[in-house]
Amino acid sequence: MAENSIKLEKNLKVINGISLLVGVIIGSGIFISPVGVIQECGSIGISLLAWVICGLISMFGAMSYAELGCMIPKAGGEYEYLMVAFGKLTGFLFIWTFIIVMIPSSFALSALTFADYALQPFYEGCSPPLAPRILLAAAAISILTLINCVSVKLTNYVQNLFNIGKIAGLLMIIGLGAYSLLNGRTENFHAPFENSKYDPGNIAVAFYAGMYSYSGWSFLNYVVEEMKNPIRVLPVSIFFGLGAVIVIYVFANIAYFTLLSPKEMIASSAVAFSFADKILGDYSWIMSIFVSLSSLGYINGALFSASRTIFGAARNSHMPSLLALINIKFLTPITSILFMGLASLLCLVIEDTFVLLKLTMLSEYIFIGGTVVGLLWLRRVKPDILRPIKVNLFFPIVFLFTCIFTIIMTFIKSPQDSLMCLFVILLGVPVYYIFVYIKKPKSIQSKIDAITIFTQIVTYSVFDDSKSD
């Protein structure tokens, strides 16, 4: 097979796009901690309204990304868009932060969440020991990494199975909620706006929690290069996938409120378990299965998407070139997948991954907001670029104000963590100039080339012919 014929396969259809979007957005959070929204809103009515508004604003952001994804149909998402709009340094700062802050810590935490709830039925009344938690989490990451390496179709099939599991869990919650309503459990809805909090600070924190629950929609743009017809697949997947998530989130919260008062919900460490315990009793352990599947679904979907971003950066020489290799047999970006899997495994040994996770959302909204600014900038400076999809300016402007609001509130509420995040991002500037911008001496480059060739042999992979402009 000729080397220049090796490319990422265009296998993704609308159903795959919807599955990926649902899989990445719906993690374990909706089962465990929708507490933040009701705690700050005070009432059921304001809480449900917040879930709807956060979902619609996320839809505005996703549709803005649809314009960028169809205009710049390359693997990498924000990385590619920021480079086109603002230059190579900005793109590098994103991929630097993506690898250091955003992805490995969230993968590790999701894997540990899976392990916690998978082991919980065997350790009734106490938390599972650390050793089996780490071993099971490591096994989950390793198996999903292997699946992602060997087949895009198998990865999508597994993603569909995880999604069926998590959706089944949510539908069970919604169904049990409907059953409770039909049996007269409506007391919590008699005064839906009682005890509402209208303080801007409370609303801001509730909004922050709601937006976090919808995060992940941008991952679909990372795989646009593998879509059969991005002009159709991207916007249709966003509309139906994110639309389904909004409906599921709202109805799941309504179901919770049929059996749990706002006070009970705030006091619960895991809302879905408190809900299941009230109606299922001894069978409430079933909820552990759904939370476990939900966590695995996030890891699988995010690993599939994130590896393509690293692949795109390596193709532009912003990461080591060996991360831009494609396996000849499986046509997957095998080295970038293995890199993400290894980085996630290393994060399992960090005692407090929550420190890194606190930085994730701020980093995300800095770069997502910057990407939307890039969309508006490109509308002004490059009006003649072919735009198969052109969204109404209302969408990106509303979403941009949301990003600015989120960033400001984060700095106000967590100044120390926010400054640490800013430091990590800016640390990428000297890294870029030392390791990327400055040409390496021949002696060093020859050693790098030798490592790359060795990696090609071990992974049976080559470079593709799709160098980014």
Image (cartoon, helix red, strand yellow):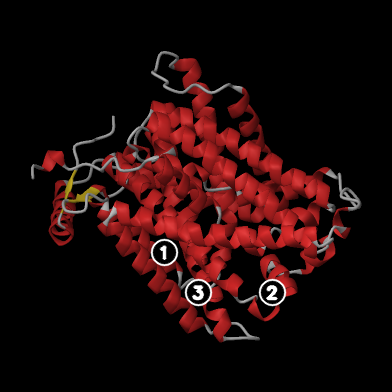
Quarter of image, res 301? bottom left
**Tag shown at residue 344:** 1
Residue 259 visible here? yes
Residue at x 14% of width, y 59% of height: 454
Q: Name the residue under label 3.
A: 115
Q: Which of 27 and 417 is in front in this view?
A: 27
Classify mark 2: helix, strand or loop.
helix
Is 363 placed left or right of 455 in the picture? right
> Of tags 1 and 2, which is closer to the observer?
2
Classify mark 1: helix, strand or loop.
helix
Disc 2 residue type (three-letter): Leu
Please say if 41 is above or below 258: above
Q: Position of residue 364 (x, y in %)?
A: 54, 46
Q: Where is residue 180 in the image (x, y as percent from the top left)?
A: 77, 62
Q: Name the residue under label 2.
A: 280
Please tell me which of labels 3 and 1 falls first in the chain: 3
* Quadrant (top left/top right/bottom left/bottom right) for the C terminus: top left
Please say if 385 is above or below 359: above
Please tell me which of labels 2 and 3 falls first in the chain: 3
Label 2 with label 3: CB-CB less than 8 Å: no
Is 467 placed left or right of 262 in the picture? left
Assess disc 3: are there few (<14), some (14-19) or many (≥20) residues with their C-alpha within 10 Å of its C-alpha: many
Distance of mark 2 from mark 3, alpha carbons? 23 Å
> Of tags 2 and 3, which is closer to the observer?
2
* Quadrant (top left/top right/bottom left/bottom right) for the N terminus: top left
